[in-house]
Image (cartoon, grey):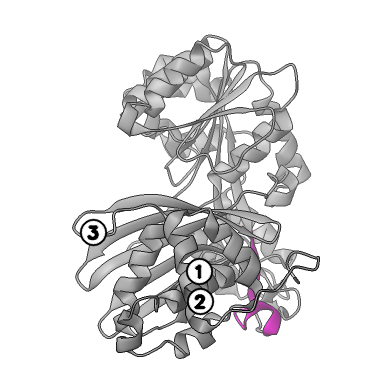
Amino acid sequence: MRIMGCETPLLHLDDESFSSRLIARFQHSSSCVSEVMAELGSELDMYQLADAMPNHEELMNEGSDAPIVRLINAILSQAIKERASDVHIEPFGQVIAVRFRIDGVLQKMLEPERRLASMLVSRIKVMSKLDIAEKRTPQDGRISLRLGHQAIDVRVSVIPCSHGERVVMRLLDKNVVPLSLSHLGMSEVLCNRVMTLANRPNGIFLVTGPTGSGKSTTLYAVISALNRAERNIMTIEDPVEYDIAGISQTQVNPKVEMTFANGLRAILRQDPDVILIGEIRDRETAQIAVQASLTGHMVLATLHTNTSVGAITRLQDMGVEPFLLSGSLGGVLAQRLVRLLCKHCRRPVTLLKEECQLLGVPWRDGLAAWAPGGCEHCHHSGYRGRTSLHELLVLNSAMRSMVHQKVNEVELVALSDNFMSLRMDGFAKILVGATSVEEVLRATDEVEGNEI
């Protein structure tokens, strides 16, 4: 009643009737999960449920797996409340580790007994319509949930390991509206520069970074800003994470040969103005993307590189001809995610000389910053939420001429106009109290190529 915001009829059932009805609903359709989540989600406590699990004999009896169903619902409900992006269920020795990835960091939440492992995995397989008998090969599925007014898409991955089957569930809130660039941690100046690149009639604009650095979120914000009736915007993604009204979004499906390359070829026959490519993974996709940008289309895409200038080298390694690349690439945005300091417990500190040296910025006495504290609002981690660090490389005429040759990344950066590195952007966010020195160094460590 608290979730739905209205009075609902109550039906009194004994334990056996309740268990049989609950199991029947879950075994017939994964859509029933949504209804049970709406009814029970806010009331379930995964810690109490785990402690109250029946003994082995009771669990094996007919109709007795309802507690397992309730435990899974409680885990998902708790993960949503904690703003977790992923839920890990991993068998280790005599226990199962249930961990949530919150603000990019895995946190152990629960350790149910090992005897529950197979039943937990089997129930998740039923919910995601996977083969519960297949335990030798990896499987992927999905679950659609509704918790109150929240529509949650759960991507399920199951893989065998030495102690059993390991499950990772990625949670995507389908009701989340793509944020504007300013809400992603960009300054007004950087927002304007990015949108100037994206508003060009043709060319390529890339967003780079490792997995989980927010590349897709940034591109969603860009195409949302570009979305107007006079533009035909089409995407090819794997997966389609969020639905955007007015934009045609296509899901990659290798089983029917709908790859990025094949999907991109088909999109080019649909008279697009702007094309979003979820990821440039191979030579074929890279070459088609470059050709599309040279024939009057604006192409937005993500690429796995550590730095903005590294994208040029990567595309050349994929076989894109330098003369084509220099004429098509407009700019590259590299980014990382860092945790935001909790505003309730952050504490003022003075930056040390050694910290400034690590950041590559000049030090002066009394340079004020902020550090994590720890309170009930952030579960004593000192952080709550995340923001982005950015590094924008815009190609000018001098840089384009260099791309024809073997790219020297240091020289390219030197020729770039108004270039600010990831660590410089991080330093700016440290000074205003958005994040800490430790977070910026952690997120950008591989950029500096520190030796072990």
User: Who's the residue at 67% across and 40% down the image?
Assistant: 221
User: Who's the residue at 53% across and 87% down the image?
Assistant: 48
Question: Does the magenta portion include 383?
Answer: yes
Disc 1 to disc 2, C-alpha distance: 6 Å
Q: Which residue is mark 3?
A: 133
In this figure, what is the number of numbered marks? 3
Q: Which residue is mark 2?
A: 17
Where does residue 83 sit, x and y in percent of width and height? 61, 65
Q: Which residue is mark 1?
A: 21
| Secondary structure type for disc 3 | loop
**Tag 1: Cα neighbours inside 10 Å, few (<14), some, or many (≥20)?**
few
| First of labels 3, 1 by sequence position | 1
Mark 3 and 1 residues: CB-CB less than 8 Å, in contact? no
User: Who's the residue at 75% across and 68% down the image?
Assistant: 8
Q: Nearer the viewer, residue 215 or 247?
A: 247
Mark 1 and 2 residues: CB-CB less than 8 Å, in contact? yes
**Tag 2: Cα neighbours inside 10 Å, few (<14), some, or many (≥20)?**
few
Where does residue 348 sit, x and y in percent of width and height? 73, 79
Mark closer to the observer (3, 1): 1
Tell me which segment is drawn in magenta.
376-386
Disc 3 to disc 1, C-alpha distance: 24 Å
| Secondary structure type for disc 2 | helix
Q: Amino acid at mark 2?
A: Ser
